[in-house]
């Protein structure tokens, strides 16, 4: 099979073919005459969808211009497998391989999509189109690439994917929901499903049909920078929350809503075992033998994935990390044998971002070959899809990858595209235009605000005088808020917001914590001031300090034992506050922690009468005021065991693997811990 000529050569070839086609057409029409007076086409003119076959060009190369019969694969009344077969048998090897590409949009020309029939594209974290970061900018770029795919020889629709992991979080002005760790604390499946639905609407509004979410890891070492992307350390809670999110993103399996044009394809990620990396080292190793790891999966760690498959997830993303030293992106035992053969997964498996480059192969071609032969069907390579394309073609030519494996991979990809209705999708259609109204809308923000309320965990609420601290706070007349995070939308959103790593400051539309408290208290004339130096102004009869972590994502959030604490600026704030609060035993001192995980900060807890873990709440910071000053009670409980000292965190995995409890002496707050305003332990 001839590989595609170079792009330049191809262009010349194309014009010659068109010229040839025109000459042939003129001769053809001359022979058959024009449409007759009734206007009916002459019986000799091709009446099916088949298109005229063009001549071989003069230089002997030929474009992939086989006759195309769309009559079956473009017929939605046909069943999916029939459509897949009818399409696959018309595809050249090059067109099949082009379906296995997942390049970054920044490295992709629309003409490449048309010329090669590339089947997918992504925006990595924060990868906005060159035109700007508004919804219309995204919609324009996405639909440009989707149209280019329809203009290809076979017209196979393009899948566009993004990390909308807590709302359509790359784009300015969208609703940003609490990260998964907060949703694990709330543990409200109906709420998580509603969040998934809302996020899917905002994603589809921009033409994007695929979401690289939810993460289904159960993190056992919060030194890991992706702890907040996981719902819990408890894999059964992860399974419940993950299934609910998938149900929301995709619509419920078996209903008309399932994969309709207001929902998105979800992605179960990152397969599998990422919560067990040694010392929480992102992209690290699960230091276990194959046998022990299989036993661990059987003990329940596989549950989030079996639940996701039951919920109808059609795409799985493999993890960067390794098990027993073997990278998952070349682990056939886990991907092909377990996920596909044993669990019967019939969707497609996508690699993580440039992850195949970590495979053991000595060349890129070997690395890609290892991934494809392990069972990975689509290769996410942000900036060199040509390398992937040429590597796979070369590997097939050398027999390193069989054509059967290529057909298998493309069958899985086409199957999902047909199931998701992509061949019937109206680019920029009325549904999409209507969904534009949902971006950042009040209804979605109300759902996010509810999630903030339900995710707060009250860790301490001691007496101040003869009332509990939070009651004393509600009775206060002049409150001081301390800490830059009281007024920092970026910190309350955390990573994966506007940019990959997230950032501090006024990064999008939303409500800060202090704004929410101001709105909740101004009517009764309560004074409210803000300090970032850690001093206490005179006359204040209540203090709220907001502190924790600055935004991060993935490996940038990995922390050593000593660094698993508040940011440097907040440490300075707290040290100053400790001095300022000396002798102030008569006023309620409340701490609100903004962080993506339990921190080693119990040394500060004695400064405060009440301590609230608020996680990474997203844009609707007023959800905190709803509980502190409104009628709502605390309902959240810890989805992670909170150790007294970070140096003991490793004990959690050891205990989990041994099927034992962690030494209670070393635990600050157990998983499931949380108080209500009456001071009672919440029981789930
Ligand atoms: C990242 C993450 C993955 C994400 C992908 C695309 O490195 O590991 O969760 O979906 O790349 O941005």
Image (tube, rainbow, N blue to C red):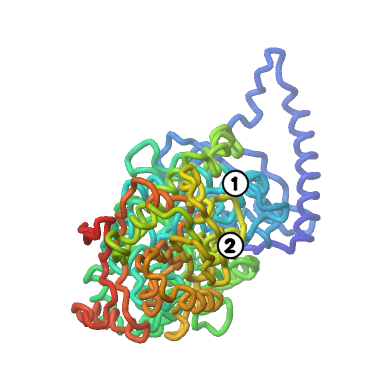
Q: Nearer the viewer, residue 257 or 193?
A: 193
Does dot 1 land on a helix, a strand or a loop?
loop
Left or right placement of residue 76 versus residue 344 in this view: right
What residue lies at 60% left-to-right and 39% top-to-bottom? 427
- The residue where tag 2 is placed is 124
Vertical order, 208 against 543 (above or below): above
What is the secondary structure assignment of the residue under circle 2?
A: loop
69 relative position to 654: left or right: right
Q: Nearer the viewer, mark 1 or mark 2?
A: 2
| Residue farthest to the front, as pictured | 539
CB at disc 2 and ligand 1 closer than 8 Å: yes
Quadrant including the N terminus: bottom right
Where in the figure is residue 479, as x and y percent of width and height?
A: 48, 58
Q: Is residue 396 left or right of residue 214?
A: right
Q: Which residue is mark 1?
A: 154
Name the spot of residue 520 as percent of width and height, x first. Answer: 46, 47
Q: Residue at x 67, y 51 (%)?
A: 114
Q: Quadrant of residue 304?
A: bottom left
Q: Which mark is residue 466?
A: none
């Amino acid at each position: 099979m001839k590989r595609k000529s170079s792009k330049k050569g191809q262009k010349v070839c194309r014009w010659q073919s068109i010229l040839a086609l025109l000459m042939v057409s003129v001769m053809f029409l001359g022979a058959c005459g024009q449409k007759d007076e009734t206007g009916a086409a002459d019986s000799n003119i091709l009446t099916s969808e088949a298109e005229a076959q063009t001549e071989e060009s003069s230089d002997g190369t030929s474009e992939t211009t086989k006759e195309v019969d769309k009559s079956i694969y473009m017929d939605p009344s046909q069943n999916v497998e029939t459509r897949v077969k009818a399409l696959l048998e018309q595809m050249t090897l090059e067109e099949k391989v082009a379906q296995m590409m997942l390049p970054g949009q920044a490295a992709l020309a629309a003409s490449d999509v048309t010329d090669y029939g590339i089947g997918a594209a992504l925006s990595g974290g924060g990868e906005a189109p060159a035109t700007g970061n508004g919804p219309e900018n995204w919609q324009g770029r996405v639909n440009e690439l989707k149209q280019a795919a329809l203009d290809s020889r076979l017209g196979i629709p393009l899948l566009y994917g993004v990390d909308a992991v807590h709302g359509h979080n790359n784009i300015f002005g969208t609703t940003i929901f609490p990260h998964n760790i907060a949703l694990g604390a709330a543990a409200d499946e109906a709420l998580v499903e509603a969040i998934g639905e809302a996020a899917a609407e905002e994603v589809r509004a921009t033409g994007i049909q695929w979401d690289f979410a939810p993460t289904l890891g159960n993190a056992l070492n919060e030194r890991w920078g992706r702890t907040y992307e996981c719902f819990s350390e408890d894999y059964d809670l992860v399974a419940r929350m993950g299934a609910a999110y998938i149900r929301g993103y995709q619509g419920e399996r078996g209903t008309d809503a399932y994969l309709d044009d207001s929902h998105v394809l979800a992605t179960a990620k990152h397969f599998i075992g990422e919560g067990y990396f040694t010392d929480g080292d992102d992209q690290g190793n699960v230091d276990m033998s194959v046998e022990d790891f299989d036993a661990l999966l059987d003990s329940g760690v596989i549950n989030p994935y079996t639940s996701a498959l039951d919920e109808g997830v059609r795409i799985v993303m493999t993890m960067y990390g390794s098990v027993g030293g073997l990278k998952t992106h070349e682990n056939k035992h886990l991907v092909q044998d377990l996920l596909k053969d044993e669990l019967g997964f019939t969707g497609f498996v996508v690699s993580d971002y440039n992850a195949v480059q970590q495979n053991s192969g000595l060349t890129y071609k070997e690395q890609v070959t290892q991934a494809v032969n392990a069972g990975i069907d689509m290769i996410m390579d942000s900036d060199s899809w040509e390398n992937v394309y040429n590597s796979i073609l070369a590997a097939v030519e050398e027999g390193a990858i069989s054509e059967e494996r290529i057909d298998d991979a493309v069958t899985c990809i086409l199957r999902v595209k047909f199931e998701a209705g992509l061949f019937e999708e109206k680019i920029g259609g009325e549904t999409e235009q209507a969904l534009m109204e949902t971006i950042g809308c009040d209804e979605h923000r109300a759902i996010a605000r509810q999630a903030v309320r339900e995710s707060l965990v009250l860790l301490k609420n001691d007496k101040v005088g003869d009332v509990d601290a939070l009651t004393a706070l509600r009775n206060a007349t002049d409150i001081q808020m301390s800490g830059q995070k009281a007024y920092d939308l970026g910190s309350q959103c955390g990573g994966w917001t506007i940019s990959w790593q997230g950032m501090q400051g006024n990064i999008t539309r939303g409500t800060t914590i202090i704004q929410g408290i101001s709105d909740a208290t101004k009517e009764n004339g309560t004074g409210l001031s803000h300090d970032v130096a850690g001093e206490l102004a005179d006359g204040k009869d209540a203090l709220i300090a907001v502190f924790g972590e600055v935004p991060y994502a993935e490996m940038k959030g990995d922390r050593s034992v000593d660094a698993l604490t508040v940011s440097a600026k907040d440490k300075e704030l707290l040290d100053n506050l400790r001095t300022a609060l000396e002798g102030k035993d008569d006023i309620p001192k409340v701490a609100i922690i903004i962080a993506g995980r339990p921190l080693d900060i119990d040394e500060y807890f004695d400064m405060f009468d009440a301590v609230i873990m608020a996680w990474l709440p997203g844009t609707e910071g007023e959800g905190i005021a709803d509980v502190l000053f409104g009628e709502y009670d605390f309902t959240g409980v810890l989805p992670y065991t909170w150790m007294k000292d970070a140096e003991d965190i490793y004990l959690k995995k050891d205990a989990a693997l041994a099927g034992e409890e962690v030494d209670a002496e070393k635990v600050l707050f157990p998983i499931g811990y949380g108080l209500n305003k009456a001071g009672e332990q919440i029981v789930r």
